[in-house]
Image (cartoon, rainbow, N blue to C red):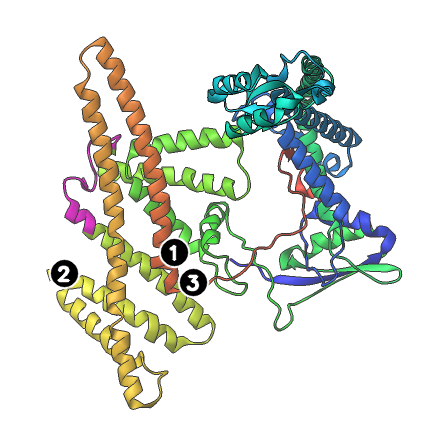
Amino acid sequence: MIVPMKKATLVILREDRDAVTEALQRCGELMPIPPEDLPPGAEQAEESLRAAEALRLIRPYQEKKGMFAPRKAVTAAELLTPDEKGRELLAQIEEASAAAEGAKARMGELDARMEELRPWAGMDIPAEALSGTRSAGVYSGYIDPQKADALREAAETQGGAVSILGSGPQGTAALIYTYRPEEGPLLEALAALGFSQAAPPCTGLPGDALAALAEERRSAEASWEAAQAKLRELARSREELELFCDQSDAAGERAQTPYSKTVQTVYLEGWVRSDRTERLRKAVEKAADCCYLAFSDPAEGETPPTVTKNNRFVSQFETITDMFSIPANGELDPNPVMAPWYWIIFGLMMGDAGYGLLMVLGIGLFKKLKKPRGEFGKLVNVLFFSGFTTILWGVLFGSYFGETWHPILFVPLDDPMRMLVFCAVLGLLHMFSGMAVQMAASIKAGRFWDAIFDQFSWMMLLAGLGLLFLPQTRTVGAALAIAGAVIVLFTAGRAKKGVFGKIIGGFGGLYGITSYMSDILSYSRILALSLSSGVVGMVMNLLAGMVGGTAVGFVFSLLIYVVGHIFNLAMGLLSAYVHDSRLQYIEFFNKFYEGGGYAFRPLQINPRFVDITDSRENQGGN
C-alpha cells in the first residue's frame, strides 16, 4: 500500500540546529523540502569529494579485498562523530599523491630534455664555443640521417669539415667547421641538402649536461618511488579512510539540510510518513529543549513523495516497479498484485528444478556472505524467491538439469502446443488481474459504470472467446463474448459528442480486440524461454555423454556438464529477468498503472562502506 504523507514544519533556535539535524539524520524519517535559497554546505561537500578521490588514489596500492570480505562495523555515534585521524590520513594521502605526481611529471620533463640532448652527447667542445673565431666558423644543426654522407661530401668539397654526432627525433646532429671566406658557398650547399641550424639545448659540454640531467632524473625517480611506498603504506588504512568518507558524506548531508533563517531561529519544512510522525516528534524533542513541530496534510497543488508499505515478500519486488516508474501518491500500489505474478512467471520461464535448487543455494550463500543492501539487495531477494517457483515448475514439468523425470503436468518439449495454450491462459489471467485493479480504482473513485463498461466488458468478451475453444463451454462462451462485445460497442464512444461520434467511438473501441490479442500472444515468450532453456540443458547433457567412457573423457564430460549448465543458468536468469519485466511493464501495467511519482528519500544515515551495528530505534532514541 502507499502510505499517506504529512507535511512537517519545524522551528528551532539557531544554537540547536546541529543537534537537531543530527537527530533528524539518526531518526531517518524526514525528507526536507528545499526552499529557493539553499544553504551552501560547500566545505563539507568538498571534503566528501576529497575523501572519495583519496579512495580512488590508493586503490591501485591496496590489497585485493575478497568478494565476501565483511564490511567494517561501527555505531551510529562513530559514524556521526568527526574523525580527526581520518582527516589526517586524507591529508597524508593527498600530500603523497601530489609528491608522486610531481615527481612523475619531473621525470617526464627530464626524459624529454635528455632525449633532446642525447644526440649532442659526443660533442667535445662547449656549446659557447660554437660561435667560432674571427677566421673560422662552427655551425651546428640537424640533417636527415640518410643524407649524412652527402653532407660530409659537400662540406669537404667546399673546404670544410664535418663531425657527425648522434641521432634523435629531430634528425642526426652534426658540427660543420669552415673558414670564413668559404662559409657562404658551404652554407648554401648545406641548406640545399636540408641541413637546419640549431644549437645544442645546453651550456657547457653536452655530455656533462646529460650526466647532470641523468642524476637529477634518478633523484626524481627516487622521490617517486618513496611517494609510491608511502601510498602503499597509507593504503593499509583503507577502512579508516572509508569510514571517514562515510562520515564526510553524512556531515555534508547535514550541512546541506535546507533550513531557512530568522533572527534567532531556523525553520525547516519536509515530508514525513503519517504513521511515523510520533517517531519524528520524539527525536526532535530529545535533541532540542525548545522547538515547534506541526504536521499538516498536503496542500492543494502539492505533490508529496511516494513511500510504500508492504510485507517482506512484496517489498522486495518494489524494485521491479520502481525501475518502470514510482507510483504516484494517492494511486493504488501495484506491487501486492504484481509481485506474485512476477514470482510465478519467472519460475515458469526458468522451469527446471535443478536450476531452481542452484538459485536457492547459490543466491542464499551470496546473501549470507555479501549481505547486499538497498535496491540491489531487493533484486537479489527477487532472484532468491524466484528460485522456489523455479523448483516448483521444474517438478511439475519433470525437468532436472535438462533431463525429464516423472512430470506431474506435462513435458513442454514433448507437447509445445499444450504449453502454448497454458501460457495464453496464464497471460489472460495476468491481464484480468490488472483490469481488476483498474476496476477497484474506478469504483473507489466513484466511477462504478466506468469499471463495468471499460474493464468488466472486456473481461467478459475475452473470457468468452477463450471458452469458445472448449466444446463443453462453447455456448456459455458465445453468450459472454456477445454480451461483452455489445457493451463495448454501445459504451466505448459514450464520451464522444453526437450520435455519429458515439457510433464511431463504439466501433473504434471494439477494434481494441486486436490489441488484446497481441498482448495475449506476447505470453508465448514464456514458452520460448522455457523450451530454449530445456533444449540447451539437454544438449549439454548429450555433449557430456558423448565424450565420456575413459578417465580423461570423464573429466572433460564433467567440465562440459558443469560449465554448460552454469552458462545456461546465467543466460536463463538474464532472459527471465528481462522478459518477465517486459510482461509486467507492457501487458500488465498498461491495464491500470500510470506511475509518475518520486521516491521518498529522507535525511538519514546511509553509509557506502561501513555497516551500522546499533538499530534504528537506538539511533533515534525512540
Horizontally, residue 173 falls left or right of residue 479, namely right
Q: Which residue is pictured at 60% across the width and 63% down the height? A: 304
- Residue situated furthest top in the rendering: 551
How far, Cα to Cα, is label 2 from label 1? 29 Å
Q: Which residue is pictured at 34% across the width and 73% down the height? A: 454
Task: Name which of mark 2 and mark 1 comes first in the sequence.
Answer: 2
Query: Is residue 3 or residue 522 the one in the foreground?
Result: 522
- Residue situated furthest left in the rendering: 471
Question: Contact, CB < 8 Å: mark 2 with mark 1?
Answer: no
Task: Name which of mark 3 and mark 2 comes first in the sequence.
Answer: 2
How far, Cα to Cα, is label 3 from label 2? 31 Å
Q: Which residue is pictured at 67% across the width and 11% down the height? A: 124
Q: Which residue is mark 1?
A: 585
Numbered disc 2: secondary structure:
loop
Name the chief secondary structure element in magenta: loop
How far, Cα to Cα, is label 3 from label 1? 9 Å
Pair 3/2: label in front: 3
Q: Which residue is mark 3?
A: 593
Numbered disc 1: secondary structure:
helix
Extent of the magenta region: 400-420
Mark 1: amino acid: Tyr
Q: Which residue is mark 2?
A: 469
Horizontally, residue 408 falls left or right of residue 212, namely left
Mark 2: amino acid: Phe
Residue 463 in percent (x, y) is at 23, 64
Magenta segment: does it hold 312? no
Query: Is residue 367 or residue 441 the one in the foreground?
Result: 367
Pair 2/1: label in front: 1
Residue 103 drawn above or below residue 434: above
Question: Contact, CB < 8 Å: mark 3 with mark 2?
Answer: no
